[in-house]
Image (cartoon, rainbow, N blue to C red):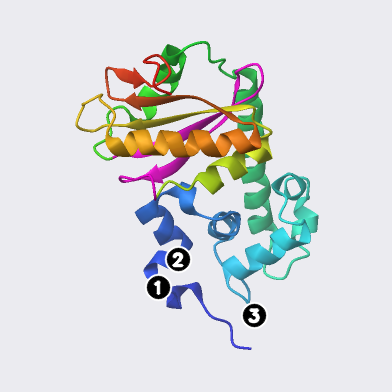
Amino acid sequence: MEKISIKSWALDDRPREKLMSKGKTVLSDAELIAILIGSGNRDESAVALAKRILLSVNNDLNTLAKLSVEELMKFKGIGEAKAISVVTALEFGKRRQFEEKASVPKIKSSTDVAKIMQPLIGDLQYEEFWVLYLNNSNKVLAKHQLSKGGFTATLVDVRLLYKRALELSAIGIIVCHNHPSEKLSPSKSDIEITKKIKQAGVTLDIKLLDHLIVTEKAYFSFADEGIL
C-alpha cells in the first residue's frame, strides 16, 4: 500500500496548518504528537505513526508519558531525537499539571469566576464559550473552550460538555461566554443555551451552578440575578 504523505492532504487536515488556522484545542492527540515527531516512515505518515503509538498504550496519555526513549525508538520511524521530543513534551505537560493542582482556584462567588475568565476572553473581538468543571469543594478541576466565533443553542455541543464532566468526575459546572459588544444583557439564545445545559445536567446529577456573560471590565451572572 502506497504511503499517503501529509503534504498531499487538504490544508485544513495538515496538523501544523490546522493549528495555525484553527487553534491548538481542535487538534487530536495524534495530530499533536505528529507535529512533535515531524515525519513518519516509508510506510506511514506522521499522523498514522502517532496513531499507532497511541494505540499501543490504549490511547492513554498517562501511559504514553511513562514510556522511555528506548521504548519509543522501537517504533519504525522514531529515532532518538524524535523520542526525546515526545518524552520532553509529555514531561512538560506533567509538570504543568502538578503546578495547576498546586494552585487550584476555589469558586466562592461569581467574582471568582470572572477573575479567571476575564483575562482569557474579556477583551476578545469574537465570542468564545467556556466551561469550568468543579469538584464537590467547588475547586476548578479544568476549564475548557467549547465553542469559538459565535454560537447558538443548537451549536453548543451539550453531549461533549457533559462527556468531559463525567471524565473528570465533576460535581458541578459553570459556563461562561463573552460579549464583544460589551452589552451584558443575556440574549434569547443565551437563555436557551442555559436552559438546555441545565436540563441535561439534571439527568446526570451534575449541577449547572452559574452562567456568566463576560466583558473586559464587567460581567453578568445568571445565578446572582436569580434567573438560572
Query: Tag 2's secondary structure?
Result: loop
- The kind of residue tagged 3 is Asp
* Residue 58 location (% of width, % of height): 76, 57
Which residue is located at x 42 percent, y 33 percent?
194
From mark 2 to mark 3, how far is it between C-alphas? 18 Å
Looking at the picture, does residue 32 appear above or below residue 195?
Answer: below
* Residue 165 location (% of width, % of height): 61, 37
Query: Tag 3's secondary structure?
Result: loop
Residue 92 in view in this figure: no
- Quadrant the N terminus occupies: bottom right
* Residue 143 location (% of width, % of height): 52, 32
- The kind of residue tagged 1 is Ala
Label 3 belongs to which residue? 43
Looking at the picture, does residue 131 appear above or below residue 159?
Answer: above
Q: Sequence order check: which comes first, mark 2 or mark 3?
A: 2
Label 2 belongs to which residue? 14
**Mark 3 burial class by Cα count in 10 Å: few <14, some 14-19, many 20+:** some
From mark 1 to mark 2, how far is it between C-alphas? 7 Å
- The kind of residue tagged 2 is Arg
Which residue is located at x 40 percent, y 73 percent?
10
Which residue is located at x 36 percent, y 15 percent?
225
